[in-house]
Image: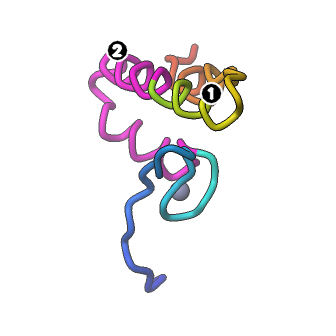
Amino acid sequence: MIARPSRPHTPMRPLWRCRNCGAEWPCQPARLSLLSEYRHDRTGLLIYLGTLMVEAGQQLAQLNEHQVPDLSDRFVAWARARG
Ligand SMILES: [Zn+2]
């Protein structure tokens, strides 16, 4: 058993890094928990991620002097149904 405080892997705005592990959000644990949370609603997950991607794009663009990073791989592509 790993004794670790269960801090959720949620994004820290406006940097969009994980509060727990510091990786770019959604980090791997965040992806896994989203996939399990939305396992019966893949469309809902994609809509949710799309909304977050827009928000992150706006906030990151302000930090990056208005260069909008391409976030579609990071936020959405991994969640599309496979196969
Ligand atoms: Zn994390």
Q: Quadrant of residue 76?
A: top right
Q: Please, is residue 3 above or below residue 83 in the view?
A: below
Total numbered circles? 2
Q: Please, is residue 38 above or below residue 41 in the view?
A: below
Find disc 1 in the rendering and name its residue. 61
Find disc 2 in the rendering and name its residue. 43
Query: Is 26 in front, or is 32?
Result: 26
Horizontal and vertical percent for residue 67? 72, 22
Q: How is the image coloured?
A: rainbow
Horizontal and vertical percent for residue 68? 67, 21
Q: Is residue 59 left or right of residue 66?
A: left
Q: Amino acid at mark 1?
A: Ala
Q: Residue at x 39, y 39 (%)?
A: 34
Mark 2 packing: few (<14 Cα in 10 Å), some, or many (20+)? some
Secondary structure beneath disc 1?
helix
| Magenta stretch secondary structure, dominant | helix
Horizontal and vertical percent for residue 81? 50, 17
Alpha carbon of mark 2 to alpha carbon of mark 1: how far? 27 Å
User: Residue 41, labelled with which disc?
Assistant: none
Read off the magenta span.
25-54
Q: Residue at x 52, y 25 (%)?
A: 58
Q: Establish whether ligand 1 lies closer than 8 Å to the Cβ of label 1.
A: no
Secondary structure beneath disc 2?
helix
Q: Residue at x 50, y 25 (%)?
A: 53
Label 2 or label 1, whichever comes before in sequence order? 2
Q: Residue at x 43, y 28 (%)?
A: 52
Q: Amino acid at mark 2?
A: Thr
